[in-house]
Image (cartoon, grey):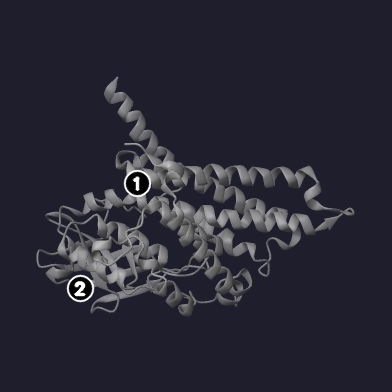
Amino acid sequence: MTRPHDFGFDETAQILKDTARRLLQDHCSPEQLHRLVAASSEPARASECVWDEALWRKMLDLGWTAVAVPEALGGFGMGLVAIAGLVEEVGRAAAPSPLIATLCATYVAAACDSDAARQLLRRIAAGLSVSLAITDRRGSWEAGDCDVTASDAGVLNGTAWFVQDARKVGVLLVKARSSRGVGLYAVDVDAAGVTIVPDAIVDLTRDQAHVELRDVAVPAERVIVSPGDGARALAAAEPAILTILAADMVGAAEWQLQTTAEYARTRVQFERPIGFFQAVKHPLVDMMVKIDAARSLLYDAACAFDHEPGAAEVGARMAKSAASDAASYCSGRSVQLHGGIGFTWECFVHLWFKRQKHNEVLFGDAAHQRARLADRLLGRIGETA
């Protein structure tokens, strides 16, 4: 299939991206973000869930939870290319919200052909926030790895681990295994038998938890995909999930570059701006090159998901790998090139540094993605040899 010009990033996608940038500049500036999530520097403070719910309502008013929902179900039906542009701006602002978790869950629900999935998508389009609860204690999200079991009557028991923004969402999309295979279940966070246990994580712009389920009864109309079909739905959605995370990292890395370059233009040492010196200038250029390479792969992956599904997995793993590398490099250089203040709590760069480190490992870091690519591509070569 022929891919469209500019990856299919059209005027509508640009309007969405520009609107997001303006909103987040006005309501989630670095100063506002630092006051919100970094009010306390006490290492022993309790795990917090701090976010601007008024800003979230503005996002809902703009229909951001509806962007990936098909038009027939009340959404905008926008392509992943447009959504990648939106998420870039969210990452650039490091905005605390359940948007990314909801978008990831949306793609999983969209891969499920059931009345329950369609009903969930309608609720998402109307503003419902959802998070995936699909990871086991070891950190694996592979279909067969699951610490939650489901009885034939749809009663869930077990624990889902590493659930993102669990204290911000209204519904969890839970993976559970039974004698018939893996299924997916929509569970209200306040349902009887559900306990959210916050995790202590480095990222101040998110919350994470493990969710304990004890005799949680799920009615048939909340079974998003029947046992045995869950693995297929998760595999179909994984390229979109990886692409969304890559977009967040690319946007955050762009903020790190621009902020560090501005500091290099204004910080004077030896009667010259420090950006004059090659020891500063060259790493800034390297940051730019890595970001541009990651961004190219990001939009290629999004375009493949929209127009060439057979290439979506390879493109998404390449994008997540490159974005993770760029995030790691830009995080380190942003701190180092800010000099003595770079590692202090008062310097804003630590917020983006921590978000990037969290993003790197979500659904597999760069090394994991390259290993999966090697298995897929080299295995295919071996099959045809």
The residue at the far left in this view is 152
- Name the residue: 35% across, 36% down: 2
Q: Position of residue 155 (x, y in %)?
A: 15, 69
Q: Earlier in the sequence, mark 2 or mark 1?
A: 2
On the rendered structure, is 363 left or right of 261? left
Please state, as top left, top right, bottom left or bottom right, where the N terminus lies in the image. Answer: top left
Residue where numbered disc 2 is placed: 216
Quarter containing the C terminus: top left
Kindly identify the residue that appears in the image at 43 percent across and 42 percent down.
Answer: 5
Q: Amino acid at mark 1?
A: Phe
Across the whole image, how many numbered discs are drawn on residues?
2
Q: Find numbered disc 2 in the image and state the secondary structure of the residue it sits on.
A: strand
Instruction: Find residue 73 and name its label.
Output: none
The outermost residue toward the right is 271
On screen, 320 above or below 42?
Answer: above
Asked if labels 1 and 2 touch by Cβ distance under 8 angstroms, the answer is: no
Q: Which residue is most to the front? A: 11
| Observer able to see residue 362 | no
Residue in the image at 38% along x and 53% along y: 80
Say which residue label 1 marks.
305
Q: In the shown orientation, is residue 186 left or right of residue 260?
A: left
Q: Which of the two residues, 367 or 11, is positioned nearer the viewer here?
A: 11
Helix, strand or loop at disc 1?
A: helix
Q: Is residue 127 above or below residue 4?
A: below
Question: What is the C-alpha distance between the residues marked 2 and 1?
Answer: 35 Å
Q: Residue at x 41, y 57 (%)?
A: 83
Along the horizontal axis of the image, is 208 left or right of 222?
Answer: right
Name the amino acid, label 2: Val
- In this rendering, the answer to whether 166 lies above or below 281 is below
262 or 174, which lies in front?
262
Give the image location of residue 361, x and y in percent: 45, 53
